[in-house]
Image (spheres, rainbow, N blue to C red):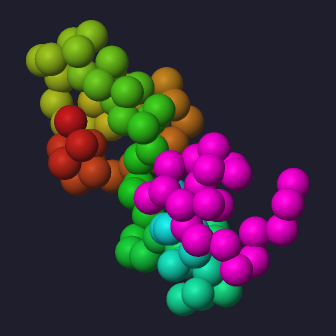
Amino acid sequence: MPPLWGKSVRKIADILQKPKSTVSDVIVKWKRRGSETAEKQTGRPKILGERSRRTLERVVKQNRKPSLLEISQDFQSSSGISVRSRTVRRES
C-alpha cells in the first residue's frame, strides 16, 4: 500500500476504497485524540443486558397474572441474575 501522508481525503478514500466521510472521521478523531478508536461510553451501565431483557419478557409473557415478586423470582431462577422488583417493574 502506498504511503498516505500528505494525501487528500479523496485520494486516501480512493486508495482504501472507503467512503470519504469514513476517512474524514478517522482523520478528525486522530487529530483530536491521537487515536482512531471510539471513546469509552460514559454513564452508568444498564442493569439488564439485551439477553436478560428478552428473558424477562419471556417470563412475563408466560403468565401475566403473578405478582411482581413472583415474576422477579421466576426471572431469577431462569436467568440466574438477582434483580430487585423495582428493576423488573421498570424493564417489563
Name above or below for residue 18 compared with residue 35: above
**Which quadrant: the N terminus?**
bottom right
- The outermost residue toward the right is 1
- Whether residue 35 is visible to the viewer of this picture, yes or no, is no
* Residue pictured at 28% horizontal, 51% vertical: 87
Residue 77 lies left or right of residue 14; in this view the side is left
The x and y percentages for residue 41 are 47, 70
The x and y percentages for residue 42 are 43, 76
In terms of image quadrants, where is residue 53?
top left
* Residue pictured at 47% horizontal, 32% vertical: 51
Magenta span contains residue 16: yes
Total numbered circles: 0
The x and y percentages for residue 11 are 62, 60
Judging depth in this view, the residue of 3 and 49 nearest the camera is 3
* Residue pictured at 76% horizontal, 69% vertical: 4
Name above or below for residue 9 compared with residue 63: below
Magenta span contains residue 81: no
* Residue pictured at 28% horizontal, 30% vertical: 71
Give the extent of the magenta segment.
Answer: 1-21
Residue 25 lies left or right of residue 87; in this view the side is right
Name above or below for residue 31 compared with residue 87: below
